[in-house]
Amino acid sequence: MSGDDFDVLRAAWTADTSLEVEVGTSRRLWRRAVRRMWFWNLVDAAVLLALTVHFALSIMGNGSWLAALVAAVTVAILLWSLRRRYLLRSAEIADPDAERVSVLGAAIRQARARVMRNSLSLAIIVPMFALGIIFGRLQKNEVARGTGEVSGPAWLDHPVVEWLAIAILVLIVAKLIQALYRDRRVLVHLRQRVDEYRAEYERDADPLA
Amino acid sequence: MQIAFGSRGVDFEKVIRDYAGLIGRITRSFEANEQDREDLRQDILLALWRALPSFRGESSLKTFVARVAQKRAVSHVRRQSRRTRTDLYEEGSSGVPADQEERVIENDIKKKLSRILSGLPVAQRETAVLLLEGFSYSEIASILGISTNAAVLRCQRAKAYLTSVLREG
């Protein structure tokens, strides 16, 4: 097949049989993506604001001007940081100088970090739940010793309720562990793929140099 | 939603009108499943929308669009890599009258090309797609973030592979 034949391939490939449909679909998807992005950005900012104000008031005291000031400054810094990250990410997407090998290197580092976070979650999930139960039990005993009675409805102390709670807790922990293991398999697989992809790029990075 | 970007005032509606075809073809070469294709296209459009303010005109807008699209496509493949690749470009002949022989042949080649591309490793696939899109070696090098020599070598390989496989039928 000659160069002319390749031009035929190229012409077939770039022939747009349904450009109007492509444009319509793209426009719809772009609008949807932007709406979703703004929605989640707003949710993020609202949650951040609520949490910061709550913590500032808890620490510094209700109705204090100092608390309000600390909350305002913290929120301003966090919002600035979010905006900065957003702009940096946008610039990174378009970076014309980024070599593919270094882009993939960064992707591999991110993938490794995700695998490590996943391993950490798997390692601490059972001890964390166990500690939660122990501290809950200790607190209950402490309250009972201090006042002679445990606060809350009496039916909570019924053995059936306790066993039911334990069964639900075990189920939740088991499901969480299962989900984490599933994530781990995907993450390890993805990391291997990026590794292979980078190796492929490195092999012919500059063959004639 | 008419939005102008940066000092150059790039109109995103116009970008969509001019490059929807290019973006569509890139997504088709990377994703087999219709739903995955739509996800990828959405990802690319959002990335472009965010990246356009930093477009300084060092390259053509088409090169810029292709660079962002390829980067997103590669990361999308990374996320979706567990899914199988089947039925690529099933809708390829939609809207084409059967009596237009030239169009039918063109679509036949297009379907074959899509099938071949879907079987290629990612690095080879992105080179092949850019070559088919008519980018020059230096543009391909810039889009993929590799040296021009590497781009030339890859393009030669891709061209030889595509033509030989298509010749074999």
Image (cartoon, coloured by chain):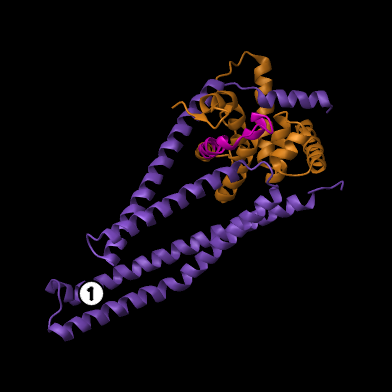
Chain colours: A purple, B orange
Please provide the residue range marked out in magenta.
B41-65
Q: Nearer the viewer, residue A187 or A168?
A: A187
Q: Position of residue A53 (x, y in %)?
A: 30, 57
Q: Position of residue A83 (x, y in %)?
A: 47, 47
Q: Quadrant of the C terminus of chain B?
A: top right
- Classified by dominant secondary structure, the portion drawn in magenta counts as helix
Q: Is residue B10 above or below residue A188?
A: above
Q: Quarter of the image holding residue A147?
A: bottom left
Say which chain tag 1 marks.
Answer: A
Q: Quadrant of the N terminus of chain B?
A: top left
- Locate residue A72 relative to residue B83 in the image: left or right: left
Q: Position of residue B158 (x, y in %)?
A: 77, 38
Judging by the rendered image, the residue that carries numbered circle 1 is A162
Q: Position of residue B56 (x, y in %)?
A: 63, 34
Q: Nearer the viewer, residue B96 or B5?
A: B5
Look at the image and tell me whether residue B152 can be seen: yes
Q: Quarter of the image holding residue A164?
A: bottom left
In the rendered structure, which amino acid carries the disc numbered 1?
Glu
